[in-house]
Amino acid sequence: MKAMIKVTLKTGVLDPQGKAIMGSLGSLGFSGIDSVRQGKYFEVELAGNNKAAAMTQMQDMCEKLLANTVIEDYEIELA
Amino acid sequence: MKAMIKVTLKTGVLDPQGKAIMGSLGSLGFSGIDSVRQGKYFEVELAGNNKAAAMTQMQDMCEKLLANTVIEDYEIELA
């Protein structure tokens, strides 16, 4: 089973990396950009076919390693 | 309009960061993990409501800045 995880900064947490990207896009001539936020993305291949068990395991992984839940949110999708 | 962009390494491109995460997950006691690949995730807020124009602009941004198309694929979703 494949799990796709998006980790994004919580609303209100400053994102200097996103700001830098927005500046660079501006320098490249792109206009009409209101904001850019950068996050992380993971694809995890799991053995087994139990969706509920996989979801629990992935949540556990996010809490323990993949996301810093003080400043980040995560979103798990199974396929 | 909000664009969500996933940038992932192309199949066959080595991902040492993903390998390191997989090792760490193993050390934390997680089992049944076949592979971990890390990518990048961007959320871009765009002015205007023209979906087709936004998609073209986002593709252009990915080609020019957000993704290195030699080794990375990108996927754009508009909401």
Image (tube, coloured by chain):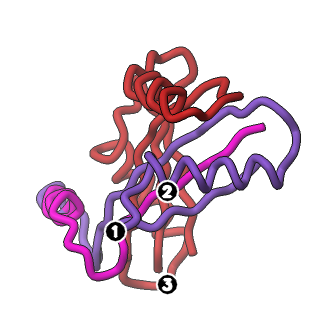
Chain colours: A red, B purple
- Give the image location of residue A51, x and y in percent: 55, 74
- Residue B32, image quadrant: bottom left
Residue at position x 59%, y 52% in the image: B60
Amino acid carrying label 3: it is Asn
SS under mark 1: loop
Q: CA distance from mark 1 to mark 3?
A: 34 Å
Q: Which chain is mark 1 on?
A: B
Q: CA distance from mark 3 to mark 2?
A: 36 Å
Relative vertical location of residue B19 with respect to residue B40 in this rendering, above or below: below
The tag on residue B63 is 2
Of badges 1 and 3, nearer the viewer stands 1
Residue A69 or B52: which is nearer the viewer?
B52
Q: Amino acid at mark 2?
A: Glu
Q: Residues within 10 Å of mark 3 (few under 14, many from 20)?
A: few
Q: What is the secondary structure assignment of the residue under circle 2? A: helix
Answer with mark 1 or mark 2, whichever residue precedes in sequence.
2
**Residue B72: x and y, percent?**
38, 65
Quarter the N terminus of chain B occupies: top right
Left or right of B75, for residue B2: right
Q: Secondary structure at mark 3?
A: loop
Q: Amino acid at mark 1?
A: Val
Residue in the picture at 61% in, 56% down:
B59
**Camera-side residue: A35 or A24?**
A24
Q: Are marks 1 and 3 in contact (CB under 8 Å)?
A: no
In which chain is the residue bearing label 3?
Answer: A
Residue range corresponding to the magenta coloring: B1-25
| Tag 1 residue | B70
* Residue A69 shown left or right of residue A79 in the figure: left
